[in-house]
Image (spheres, rainbow, N blue to C red):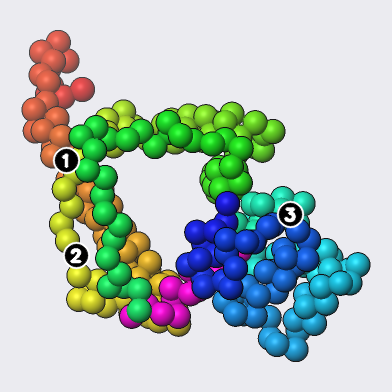
């Protein structure tokens, strides 16, 4: 179930990896830290590398906390999938030139668009990890049934969006290509991936400010129209209220 990410990370045996095998699991965690994540200094990895130790679960729990993983050691599949995602992000950040020109996967030639929820496996660790991560971001209370959590997430998102934006979300919008290289960020995070993300967020923020300014202008025009057309009350002998 983790084969795709392990393959992307060039793990030595992605097809034969068994996350239920404790020794394989621990070795893979150490490999991720040593080769991809590298959060600890080499001299600080001793406890994590001591795979046979009975204290390894404590070291692993501390490691999850140190890398700010939203899952604990007891949420084994979710935490492991999160670490794989973190490793993939670092792998891309370290090799941007290598991956940025990769050809995208061919789009489906099917005449009818596939429903992404038709083959949804609610018992999949990837599904559970994604729903839990969204729930944490939106501060939604955890529930034993992940489908119930997903429904709560959908309701919350719909309630936070106006009917106008909900309707607009179902319409296809053709965007305008933007060259990030032409937009100066103004600071450097030290990570190429984070720099690109910051540039995108800045452009989106500018677009939101433009929309806000447009609405402010419309409100000013509406107020001016009311002020410029006062009501005359002959009983009071004056103009206006």
**Residue 20 disc label:** 3
Closer-to-camera residue (77/236): 77
Closer-to-camera residue (65/119): 119
Whole-percent x and y of residue 49?
A: 78, 78
Whole-percent x and y of residue 152?
A: 54, 31
Q: Residue at horizontal 61%, vertical 46%?
A: 125
Q: Is residue 213 visible?
A: no
Taking the image as shown, residue 143 lies to the left or right of residue 163, namely: right
Report if the CB atoms under discs 3 and 1 are less than 8 Å apart.
no
Q: Earlier in the sequence, mark 3 or mark 2?
A: 3
Secondary structure at numbered mark 3: loop
Q: Is 16 contained in the magenta span?
A: no
Measured in 3D between alpha carbons, the distance from the residue under mark 3 to the one under mark 1, in whole angstroms, is 60 Å
Q: Is residue 126 visible?
A: yes
Q: Earlier in the sequence, mark 1 or mark 2?
A: 2
Q: Earlier in the sequence, mark 3 or mark 1?
A: 3
Q: Residue at horizontal 78%, vertical 66%?
A: 23
Secondary structure at numbered mark 1: helix
Taking the image as shown, residue 180 lies to the left or right of residue 17, namely: left
Q: Residue at horizontal 68%, vertical 57%?
A: 18
Outermost residue to the right: 54
| Other-residue count near label 1 (Cα within 10 Å), few / some / many at <14 / 14–19 / ≥20 | few
Q: Residue at horizontal 23%, vertical 76%?
A: 181
Quarter placement of the C terminus: top left
**Residue 218 disc label:** 1
Whole-percent x and y of residue 41?
A: 68, 86
Measured in 3D between alpha carbons, the distance from the residue under mark 3 to the one under mark 2, in whole angstroms, is 45 Å
**Residue 178 disc label:** 2
Magenta segment main secondary structure:
helix
Boundaries of the magenta span? 82-97
């Amino acid at each position: 179930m983790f084969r795709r990410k392990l393959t992307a990370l060039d793990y030595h045996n992605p097809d034969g990896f068994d996350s239920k095998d404790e020794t394989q699991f621990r070795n893979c965690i150490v490999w991720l830290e040593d080769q991809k994540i590298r959060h600890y200094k080499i001299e600080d990895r001793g406890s994590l590398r001591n795979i046979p130790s009975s204290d390894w679960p404590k070291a692993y729990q501390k490691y999850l906390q140190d890398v700010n993983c939203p899952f604990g050691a007891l949420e084994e599949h979710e935490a492991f999938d999160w670490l794989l995602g973190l490793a993939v992000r670092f792998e891309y950040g370290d090799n941007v030139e290598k991956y940025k020109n990769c050809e995208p996967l061919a789009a489906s030639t099917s005449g009818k668009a596939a429903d992404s929820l038709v083959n949804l496996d609610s018992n999949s660790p990837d599904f559970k990890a994604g729903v839990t991560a969204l729930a944490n971001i939106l501060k939604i209370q955890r529930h034993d049934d992940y489908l119930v959590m997903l429904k709560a997430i959908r309701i919350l998102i719909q309630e936070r969006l106006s009917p106008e934006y909900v309707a607009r979300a179902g319409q296809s919008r053709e965007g305008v290509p933007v060259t990030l290289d032409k937009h100066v960020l103004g600071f450097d995070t030290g990570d190429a991936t984070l720099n690109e993300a910051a540039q995108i967020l800045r452009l989106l923020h500018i677009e939101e400010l433009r929309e806000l300014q447009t609405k402010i202008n419309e409100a000013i025009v509406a107020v001016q129209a009311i002020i410029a057309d006062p009501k005359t009350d002959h009983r009071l002998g004056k103009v206006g209220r």
